Image (spheres, rainbow, N blue to C red):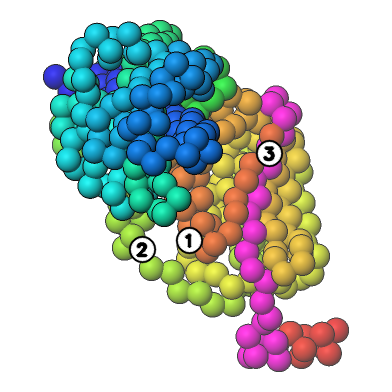
């Protein structure tokens, strides 16, 4: 039942609201009760004080020795006074009792009801408390004196010699406060329920707004598990949920691109493996069957050798990729003359450069520039970039290898004029198995691993490699390496060569 986030959220919200209603009602009720209790106690205390002072003054001036006789003789005078004392209070009743607790006079709200009920006598407990000549404040029935609990305040009346001769008690049934609290609680509950309903509706839509993208992501993830990478999550708004949805879609795009690249790679590998193997098998069968004349056998053996080398390069690239991804390829860092390395690669490509009639330029700040790198790994990177530049250059175009100092770094770049790379392909050229020449019109031998391996090698050197291109015009690959000084032996050799010049 509580597996759904929506149900959990709504349940938690309802529980919090119910607890909040209970706590707020309890706190408000308690505060109102305390306030009312203090307020009524003060009022009752003032009434009993004023009444007792009036009675004591008159009693002492009358000269009566017996307090009961005084009360009996002044009933007509005192009753209007008692009524006047509580005239501004609708629910207060005044009692005047003698020293034994017998109620002699009654005034106020319940006067008629009290008189109709017969004689009233204070319980012994109350008389004992009054005998100590201290006021008594209670919320009680006073041992059955009242049918229901009343708020009472009793003040003793003393004679000149300090004896307690009577008392004045002011009481209220507190029914008005009970009605007020009941109405208040109902109001709080009803208003809170309406607010809760409104909040519940708002929470429903807010929660649905949060949960709906999660459901979409869950469905999309199941689609991914089934191999369907075209599922996407709707993006609306600009909050964190929208950012998550957008990130999810970006991940989906990456997965889709990776899947397409993987399929393309499998197709390319299948083609690259099948074609030379078919060629090799066909020529070998022809030689064995005597179809090919003996004088042409060396030519076809050279073709077979070329195809075997092609397979060897492909397998070597796959092995390199496996080692890189497994973290098994180790790099030995040492000073390397990057200028000399670039010159050797250009010289080794002389035949291909001449075939394309390229305008070759070697642009270096100095004849020798040393970098800290793994010689074989950087040779592989630079050779791959130079080889690609020749492969994708147009006939007669510029071919520039540049080596320049940029602060503590040396930047190596390879520029060629040709079709370049389209803006759509530019972000993916360093991805493994990616080939921008999908028609294989120019690149018939590559498997889409060279640039990925090059990037991995440069990143292992903690450096950057980048590509720039204007589609249909030119392309430029560049990477950086940390600059260093020449080894001592080579530095001395350079000094000798400079002196000889």
The x, y position of residue 145, in whole percent, is 20, 26
Viewer-closest of 309 and 63: 63
Give the mark toward the camera: 1 or 3. Answer: 1
The x, y position of residue 25, in whole percent, is 36, 25
Q: CA distance from mark 1 to mark 3?
A: 22 Å
The residue carrying mark 1 is 460
Of marks 2 and 1, which one's residue comes earlier in the chain? 2
Residue lying at 21% horizontally and 20% vertically, measured from the top left: 119
Residue lying at 79% horizontally and 69% vertically, measured from the top left: 366
Q: Examine the structure image and report whether residue 494 is included in the region drawn in magenta.
A: no
Left of 121 or right of it: where is 263? Answer: right
**Numbered disc 2: secondary structure:** loop
The residue carrying mark 3 is 468
Count all numbered tags in the image, as a single digit: 3
| Above or below, comparing residue 84 to residue 53 in the picture | above
Question: What residue range appears in magenta?
Answer: 470-493
């Amino acid at each position: 039942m509580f597996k759904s986030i929506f149900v959990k959220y709504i349940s938690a919200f309802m529980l919090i609201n119910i607890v909040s209603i209970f706590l707020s009602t309890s706190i408000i009720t308690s505060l109102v009760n305390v306030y009312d209790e203090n307020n009524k106690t003060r009022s009752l205390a003032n009434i009993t004080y004023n009444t007792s002072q009036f009675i004591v003054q008159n009693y002492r001036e009358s000269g009566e020795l017996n307090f009961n006789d005084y009360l009996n003789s002044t009933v007509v005078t005192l009753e209007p006074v008692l009524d006047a004392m509580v005239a501004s209070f609708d629910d207060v009743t005044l009692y005047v009792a003698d020293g034994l607790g017998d109620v002699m006079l009654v005034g106020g709200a319940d006067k008629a009801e009290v008189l109709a009920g017969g004689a009233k006598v204070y319980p012994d407990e109350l008389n004992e408390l009054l005998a100590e000549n201290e006021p008594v404040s209670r919320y009680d029935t006073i041992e059955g004196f009242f049918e229901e609990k009343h708020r009472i305040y009793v003040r003793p009346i003393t004679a000149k010699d300090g004896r307690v001769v009577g008392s004045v008690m002011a009481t209220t049934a507190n029914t008005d406060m009970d009605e007020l609290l009941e109405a208040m609680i109902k109001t709080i509950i009803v208003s809170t329920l309406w607010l809760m309903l409104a909040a519940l509706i708002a929470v429903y839509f807010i929660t649905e707004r949060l949960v709906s993208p999660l459901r979409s992501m869950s469905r999309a993830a199941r689609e991914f598990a089934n191999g369907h990478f075209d599922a996407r999550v709707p993006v609306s708004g600009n909050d964190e949920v929208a950012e998550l949805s957008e990130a999810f879609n970006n991940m989906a795009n990456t997965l889709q691109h990776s899947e397409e690249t993987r399929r393309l790679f499998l197709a390319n590998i299948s083609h690259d493996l099948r074609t030379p193997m078919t060629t090799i098998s066909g020529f070998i069968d022809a030689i064995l069957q005597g179809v090919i004349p003996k004088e042409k056998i060396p030519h076809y053996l050279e073709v077979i050798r070329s195809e075997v080398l092609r397979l060897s390069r492909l397998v070597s690239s796959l092995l390199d990729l496996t080692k890189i991804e497994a973290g098994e390829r180790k790099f030995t860092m040492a000073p390397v003359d990057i200028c000399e390395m670039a010159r050797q690669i250009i010289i080794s490509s002389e035949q291909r450069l001449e075939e394309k009639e390229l305008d070759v330029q070697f642009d270096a700040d100095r004849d020798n520039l040393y970098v800290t790198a793994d010689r074989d790994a950087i040779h592989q990177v630079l050779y791959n970039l130079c080889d690609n530049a020749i492969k994708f250059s147009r006939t007669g175009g510029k071919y520039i290898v540049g080596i320049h100092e940029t602060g503590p770094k040396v930047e190596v770049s390879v520029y060629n004029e040709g079709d370049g790379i389209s803006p759509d392909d530019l972000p993916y050229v360093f991805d493994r198995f990616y080939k921008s020449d999908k028609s294989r019109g120019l690149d018939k031998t590559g498997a889409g691993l060279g640039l990925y391996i090059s990037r991995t090698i440069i990143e292992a050197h903690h450096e950057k490699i980048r590509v720039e291109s204007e589609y249909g015009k030119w392309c430029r690959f560049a990477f950086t390496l940390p600059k260093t000084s020449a080894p001592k032996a080579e530095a001395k050799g350079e000094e000798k060569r400079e002196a000889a010049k």
